[in-house]
Amino acid sequence: MKPLSSFPRRTYVTQPTPLQPAPRLSRLLGGPEIYIKRDDLLPGAGGGNKTRKLEFSIGDALARGEDTLITSGAIQSNHCRLTLSWARVEGLECHLVLQEPAPGAFDPEAGGNNFLYQLLGADSLRIVSGRGEAPLAMERLAGECRDRGRKPCVIPVGGSSPVGATGYAACALELISQFRELDLRVDHLVVPSGSAGTQAGLLAGFRGAGYELAVTGVNVSRSRDLQEPSVYELALATASRLGVESPVPRESVDCNGDYVGPGYALPTPEMMEAVGLVARSEGILLDPVYTGKAMAGTIDLIRKGVFRKGQTLVFVHTGGSPALYVHMEAFRRRYPPPPATDSAGNER
Ligand SMILES: *Cc1c(COP(=O)(O)O)cnc(C)c1O
């Protein structure tokens, strides 16, 4: 594998994120020893995994002399929020193409990431229907930017190109050195799997370093049949960019589609359970769209005996907690408010 220093890169990740033991959660579940990789604590407004990809995606854009970022995601997109956040740091223009799941779903007054687009000062939002329309909408927007004399860079949905996924190959190397420091033998790594770059980058990185462990992706939008080929293809392309000699084997790509529920970003009871359990045992905020469902899958696979006592499991916390505030009503129903009194002890 080529040294990562041979690729254009900005330095946004100034130190390794914690690999934190979760002893209370592990005890409650009665399965493997769980460690949480705290990529939710990565720098960039609100934190989360897209910062690692953007080190390389924006590094590439700046190396080409580009001055305007265009990207796309769902109406509540962590990727759009973080692209915008780093655009502010770099002094770049930033335009977002937001995909509505249904006509009229975009609400300019919505909370969560949508509010943060406004606070971080997005240069424009363009609302399109569904996923299919986004690439064309981004190209059209890029044309308009060129007409104004700008030099646009189109970053694909989720930053999931071989360039972006390189950020998660870097994370694999960071994890390997943390495993060595803590003298850990890791059996399983669990990661949410959406636009595929995180899982693909990790697979390419572990392969490149010759480190063997089972990586389980928990899908957040697609079935196993659709997600595995997409992760596999990107893992191969990323490994090839990195000059990894032995290709990623197809059997190492495992994308579990059992925890998506009714669809992308739609809550499930198991997600609500997992978010509450991790908040109340470890004081860590998961998110409703990605890590909540990935943890719901982890819990179920422990109950089914796939992940077992005596093993060590690393759960990659990819961030996303701003989206919790989009689902406040549902969480409030599931987790009733604590008793509140005034100073005289009367109920408030
Ligand atoms: C984007 C995202 C993911 C999924 O990563 P992909 O590389 O798109 O598969 C997981 N968690 C959070 C919080 C995200 O924003």
Image: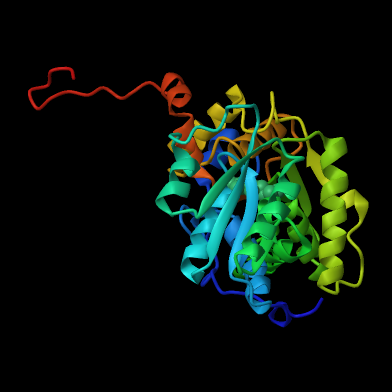
Give me the residue at 57% from left, 41% from top.
26
- What is the number of callouts on the image? 0
Q: Give the quarter of the figure containing the N terminus.
A: bottom right
Judge by depth and name the residue closer to the eye, 310 or 4: 4
- The answer to whether 17 appears left or right of 138 in the picture is left
Q: Is residue 112 visible?
A: yes
Judge by depth and name the residue closer to the eye, 114 or 68: 68
Q: Give the quarter of the figure containing the C terminus.
A: top left
Query: From what the image shows, is residue 302 above or below residue 253?
Result: above
Where residue 268 sits, quadrant-wise, is: top right
Measured from the top left, where is residue 327 in percent x and y?
A: 48, 29
Measured from the top left, where is residue 46 in percent x and y?
A: 46, 52
Measured from the top left, where is residue 102 in percent x and y?
A: 65, 27
Residue at the front extreme of this rendering: 147
Give me the residue at 68% from left, 73% from top.
60
Q: Is residue 33 visible?
A: no
Give me the residue at 74% from left, 66% from top.
163
Colour mapping used in the image: rainbow
Query: From what the image shows, is residue 275 above or below residue 120?
Result: above
Give me the residue at 43% from left, 23% from top.
329
Judge by depth and name the residue closer to the eye, 130 or 176: 130
Where residue 74 sits, quadrant-wise, is: top right
- The answer to whether 24 appears left or right of 301 in the picture is left
Residue at the left extreme of this rendering: 344
Query: From what the image shows, is residue 102 above or below residue 88?
Result: above
- The answer to whether 43 appears left or right of 264 in the picture is left
Query: From what the image shows, is residue 129 above or below residue 347?
Result: below
Measured from the top left, where is residue 118 in percent x and y?
A: 43, 47
Where residue 126 sits, quadrant-wise, is: top right
